[in-house]
Image: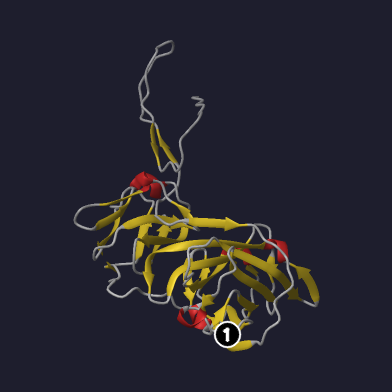
Amino acid sequence: MRKKWSLGLMSAALLASSLMVTPAFCADNNIKVEYANSSTQAQSNTIASKITLTNTSRQEISLENYTLRYYYTKDQDFKQCMWCDNASMIAGGSYTTLTQKITGTFVDMDAPTDNADTYLEIGFAKGTGILAPGGVVEIQLRLTNDGWKNYDQSNDFSFDEVENIPLYEDGVLVLGKEPVAEGVTDVQVAKTDLSYDKNVAINNEVSTAISLNDNTLEAVKLNGKALAAEDYTLDADGKFTFSESYLKGLEVGTYKYVLDFSAGKDVVITVDVTDTTDYDFAITLPKVAVKEGDEVEIPVAIQNIKEGINNMDFTLS
């Protein structure tokens, strides 16, 4: 079980120190991540960083969809604290302060590595806003423990390496690397691109085979929210299946699910939902011979109904 602390934000003056700048790293030409280490000494009671995100695409992006992780070893058993000294967005010549919009969550890793047992997940609160093409967000952070004891940064995964500060979009890794524990084998998923047709005339089982390799499936998440237990199954043979009742409730579109495992890397499964049903509404009434004044039951056949019928009136002439 992961232990998490969601911390409030506090403003303070950034500690004066030398600045180590690492190269930029780009994700699919949509967003660029840059990182400057503001506390470069190996032994330090503060991990200080400046992280810059640049929208390098031609489309607006919603900041609240993105998170970053800083992986490190906390070295001693103290409560971890995050300080956001300053955060801002510059886009289209306008300046917006974001200091109170930066969120931080500390997570103890289920499978620690030699260079990481904890990570700080950095995100944006709801309502943070849109980053326009060419817009830049700069975040200045400090990470400490409540005992103000030194960290040994020399064995921290994310120290001095921008590629080791991974970027996530809606919980899906899109840029960078995560630490891997020695002796941990990642799960193997036979097929990660799945499809579902809402046409009831088609066999709609959506499943794939998973080799757990001594890992366990902790959760299945969509946009960071865990699905209910009845929305999927994983049997003893490793067959993973989305339930028909869950899939029926989805709108046509593409969905990316993050399968969160106890150790090793998470896996992203994409489900493409389509609907090939012919929705040309049709009502068929049979011919019935009657005389004036007769009472008769007339069977009505209705085809191609997409949703339930609440009320229907018939007029015969």
Q: Hey, which residue is sitting farthest left in the picture?
A: 237
- Residue 47: percent from left, percent from top: 59, 75
Mark 1 Cα-neighbour bin, 10 Å: few <14, some 14–19, many ≥20: some
Where residue 238 appears, as percent x and y from the top left, is 23, 58
Q: Can you tell which quarter of the image residue 288 is in?
A: top left
In this rendering, the count of numbered labels is 1
Residue 131 image point, x, y percent? 68, 71
- Specify the quadrant of the image occupied by residue 97: bottom right
Could you say which is closer to the camera, residue 234 or residue 293?
Answer: 234
Q: Secondary structure at mark 1?
A: loop
Q: Front-most of 18 and 120?
A: 18
Image quarter in which the N terminus is found:
bottom left
Residue at screen point 33% across, 48% down? 243
Q: Is residue 59 left or right of residue 315?
A: right
Identify which residue is drawn at 24% across, 66% down: 213
As rendered, which of 198 and 107 lies closer to the eye? 107
153 w.r.t. 300: above or below? below
Q: Is residue 78 above or below residue 37?
A: above
Q: Is residue 252 above or below residue 184?
A: above
Q: Which residue is mark 1?
A: 41
Residue 256, horizontal then vertical, whole percent:
44, 62
> In the displayed structure, does residue 49 sit left or right of residue 282?
right
Is residue 71 depicted above or below 226 in this figure? below
What is the residue that sits farthest to the right in this orientation?
94
Determine the residue positioned at 37% across, 23% down: 298
